[in-house]
Amino acid sequence: MSVKPSFPALATAASLITLPALVFGQSDGYPDTLDPIVVTATLGPRTVGESLSSVTMVDEEEIRRQQPKEFRELIESQPGITVSGNGSFGKQTGVFIRGHSSDATVLLVDGVRIRSATVGGPAWQYLPPQLLNRVEIVRGSRSSLYGADAVGGVVQAFTLPRARGNRGWIEAGGGNFDSQQYGGGFSSVTDQTSVSLGANYFRTDGAPVIAGGDDKGYDNLSGVASARHEFDNGIKTGLSFLSAEGNTEYEGGEEDFHFQTAGVNLDVPITANWRTSLHLADARDELEDFSSFPGIFNTRTRSSRIENWLTAGTHEFVIGAEYLVDKVESTIAYEESSRSNEAFFGQALLNFGRTDLHLSLRSDDNEAYGTEATWGAAIGYKFDAHHRVRASAGTSFKAPSFNDLYFPDFGNPDLEPEEASSYETGIEGRYTSWFWDLAVYQSDVEDLSLPSQNQAGSVPEARLRGIELSSGWEQDGWFLNAVASAGDFEDEGTGRQLARRAERSVRLDLDKQIGVWSFGTTVRAESHRYEDIYDFSSMTTIRERIAGFGVWDLRASKALAPGWQAFLTVDNVLDNKYATAKRFDNTNFIAAGRTFMASIRYDFQQ
């Protein structure tokens, strides 16, 4: 996170509330403390401390400094997060938060949920980081607010403009693997109205995804648009849109993809203590596969959500309902091609001076797997302006996907939803120029979804527990973020570590501004993990070990003239060979080696 003397306003798609990007709070005569505002943890604006959650925020300055080519670069090795991939540059990516399955995390884009109903999880690899202004990562159970799949946590990406005035940018760059990137955009933000447009194109010949293989290319053409207006009577309305489409090659074939979210919001103040917000959304995850087993797998999700926010003194209450429909169009003959979900939820955000209490409850009724009720509770105590302790507990569930239930000769229509009970305690310190946060957690999971390569199945009981430590410091042009995580993600029936999860990881981001220059580095390392390979000849599953790894990245930028800036990034400086997943034939999916990218950007303001 970065600190500046003043901060522009931003508008969140989820609530369309205008609020400062960062707040410096002061109480009891103590000095100012840094505490960024987030909206994902509690559906509305709260500082990280007030959210009583484990939250990591990657702001716009961090994104610009890192110059990521893929979204995974922003979140891998962050607290409690392990990322696995079938190679680099747009290849299939899994995100495991606190040991939970990749499809047990909700991905939101400007408040719109997107995922593949066939696979069950989101296509993380297609989200364009070049068009994002902020990312919030909430770790821990959130099904009592977001319903199915918010077991490991919720990741929300924001594209909406923050800076006031009329602004624009253009950017072009290139690197090895014949990589090219071009982008541009414009935004106009006033007290009452904001509009924005942006587009980005990234292409690369790619790198081999297995040892001795051919280069596997990737291209992604993406765009964003948004508009927001607040009328004189306090009514707010807005819309947001993101689209990404292109092609990615993999070992054995290639696929065309289309990744799209669209949302419309209306926020109406009924009285001084009651406002109602309505959110309508459409999300599409479309895929056409060209291989020896070609097929079309298209998901369309439409949802409507209403929230009533009531205030009573320092207390806030939310009462809401949500209706969601998944539809699948495919060349595969699924037994069912659609399902609907009705939900009702409530939340109480209570404040008693130094003590905060959060309570939430939700009921989901799905025509495919029945009714699931979830709850959440958190309590926090603020010792002074700098230190707070928190504890939370809750239940969550992950819905079986269409593949889990209905894929011919693979699905199991009797598969039950995965259910979890989660607990967490944490303590934090936030000061003028630095912060630290320590969290300890445990999840007890029943019927943990763990599809094998021959049939959808589950682990009857799993225990996931761990500890996370994060800290950051910003002063005199220095920016430091440090993270360490350790976990124990175990199948209680066999005592074995769950597949594809690294149980230990560290990450260090360090940047320094020196006049017109900026220099930075990221060092991260993860421990070994395992892959379960199904051996069709013996009809058994074989466990294989994937070695741990370390990666060192470098970056630099220079302000050339007013508005002009040049960037250079070198990832995997030491050209380490490593893998985070294996193929069905027990060969490693390897990451690209040393990767560099140079670009130039022009920002203008009126």
Image (spheres, rainbow, N blue to C red):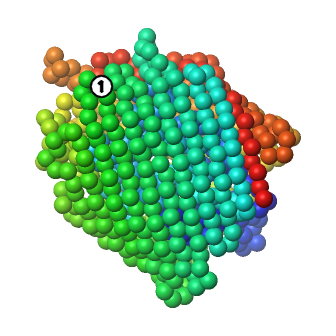
Quadrant for residue 69, please give it.
Answer: top right
Evaluate whether residue 367 shows in this view: yes
Question: In the displayed structure, would residue 339 be above or below residue 454?
Answer: below
Q: Is residue 185 left or right of residue 330?
A: right
Q: Measuring 71% from the left and 63% from the top, which residue is drawn there?
A: 164
Question: In the displayed structure, would residue 77 be above or below residue 381?
Answer: above
Residue count near mark 1 (Cα–Cα under 10 Å), binned few <14, some 14–19, many ≥20: few
Circle 1: residue type: Ser
Q: Is residue 189 left or right of residue 547?
A: right
* Figure disc tally: 1
327 or 104, which lies in front?
327
Secondary structure of the residue carrying numbered label 1? strand
Q: Measuring 42% from the left and 14% from the top, which residue is drawn there?
A: 213
Evaluate whether residue 420 shows in this view: no
Quadrant for residue 178, please give it.
Answer: top right
**Residue 286 % position (x, y):** 35, 44
Q: Measuring 51% from the left and 23% from the top, which residue is drawn there?
A: 206
530 or 383, which lies in front?
530
**Residue 103 % position (x, y):** 35, 45
Q: Quadrant of the C terminus?
A: bottom right
**Residue 290 % position (x, y):** 31, 28
Q: Which residue is mark 1?
A: 291
Q: Is residue 120 left or right of residue 393?
A: left
**Residue 73 % position (x, y):** 55, 37
